[in-house]
Image: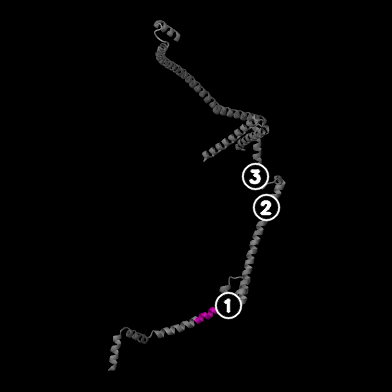
Amino acid sequence: MKKKINNNMAKKHAKKKVTESSEIVNFLTSISQKNYSEANKYLQNVIDLKLKTKIGVAQKENLF
Amino acid sequence: METNLTNALKEAAKDILTEDVLKEIENAFETSVNEKVKLHVEKALNEQDADYSSKLEKLIEAIDTDHTAKLKKVVEAIDDRASKLKAVVEKYEAALNKEASDFKSSIVDHVSKYLDLYLDEKVPSASIQEAVKNKKAYNLLEDLRKTLSIDLALANDNIRDAVVDGKSKIDEAAKQLEAAQKQVTKLVEENKKLNSQLVLEKKVSNLDEERKSYMKKMLGNRSAEFIKENYEYTLKLFEQSEEERLKNLKSEAITETVTSNVDRPVVEEASSTPAQEAVDPSFTAYISELKKY
């Protein structure tokens, strides 16, 4: 049961990582094509994902 | 040539031969000479042709050998170049496939790390943790407040004591009300029971004992309304059942009398004789013969 939960968490983490990296790739592609508005959106998504990850890590810590 | 030969023959023959003979001799000589020349020329041409052919063959062979060797060298050189080009292509393909993807992933990784550092600088992890803890604590307090039914007014000690006192009074009043309601219900039930008994007693007061006990048995546990509605009907039922009982007794007495008449032995003999006659015709003939004497 514990192993299954760990696997699910690893999969979720990997999915998040893939999404983050794909967003960075899109950001770089948009920058290279001088499409700055799209690049801004992708960078915003990356920042959001990073902040969410940090908040998720902080949420796992016990309050007391 | 012709003039020379003609002149030479003229001088040799000295007017012995005529002009025509000389011309014929000349013609014959020229013809034979021409044939021989032709033969020689042909022979020479053949020899030259054979010579040239052999030489040409040798030349061609030499050229072929040379060209073959040169072509071999060219092919080897092309093969060498092709293998080098293949290596170059493979290298560039590898560079495109692996190194480019490695470069891409490293670039992405570097950008990600840079953004992490930037975020750490601008929004420190400690601040995020503190904010998350605050939010969790707030949610926890909200849940506790909902669970314990505490609002901001209850947080004050005076109000809280008053509310607690009021709640205890309300609880006590609710208990008293419940007890009173139970008592009222009990009294109402008893009243209904007494009322129905009173109504039944009034109704059956002028009846004989048998009917009275029957009516009490049938309507004893019923309500006053039910007794009022169904008293006459129940009494009629009793009357009908009495009549039926009498009728049944009468019919039973009649049935017993008929049964005793049927059981007589004489009746049994009379009934058995025609049966035997019907069964045995010789017996009938024998009786009729006896009757004659």
The residue beneath circle 2 is B168
Q: Is residue A21 magenta?
A: no
**Residue in the picture at 66% in, 56% down:** B174
Estimate how packed mark 3 is, as few (under 14), some (14 to 19) or many (20 or more) residues with alpha carbons within 10 Å. Answer: few
**Residue B36 horizontal/vertical position (percent):** 39, 13
In-image side of B96 versus B261 (left or right): right
**Magenta stretch, overall SS:** helix
Closer to the eye: label 1 or 2: 1
Q: Is residue B120 visible?
A: no
**Residue in the picture at 57% in, 36% down:** A15
The numbered mark, 1 or 2, whose residue comes first in the sequence reads 2
The residue beneath circle 1 is B235
The magenta stretch is B238-247
Chain letter of mark 1 equals B
The residue beneath circle 3 is B143
Quadrant occupied by the N terminus of chain B: top left
State the CA–CA distance, disc 1 to disc 2.
Answer: 58 Å
Estimate how packed mark 1 is, as few (under 14), some (14 to 19) or many (20 or more) residues with alpha carbons within 10 Å. Answer: some
Instruction: Please tell me in which quadrant of the rendered image residue B214 appears.
Output: bottom right
**Residue B74 horizontal/vertical position (percent):** 48, 19
**Which residue in the rendered view is the most extreme toward the bottom?**
B293
State the CA–CA distance, disc 2 to disc 3.
Answer: 25 Å
Q: In this rendered view, identify the residue nearer to me: B70 or B56.
A: B56
Q: Secondary structure at mark 3?
A: helix
In-image side of B142 versus B51 (left or right): right
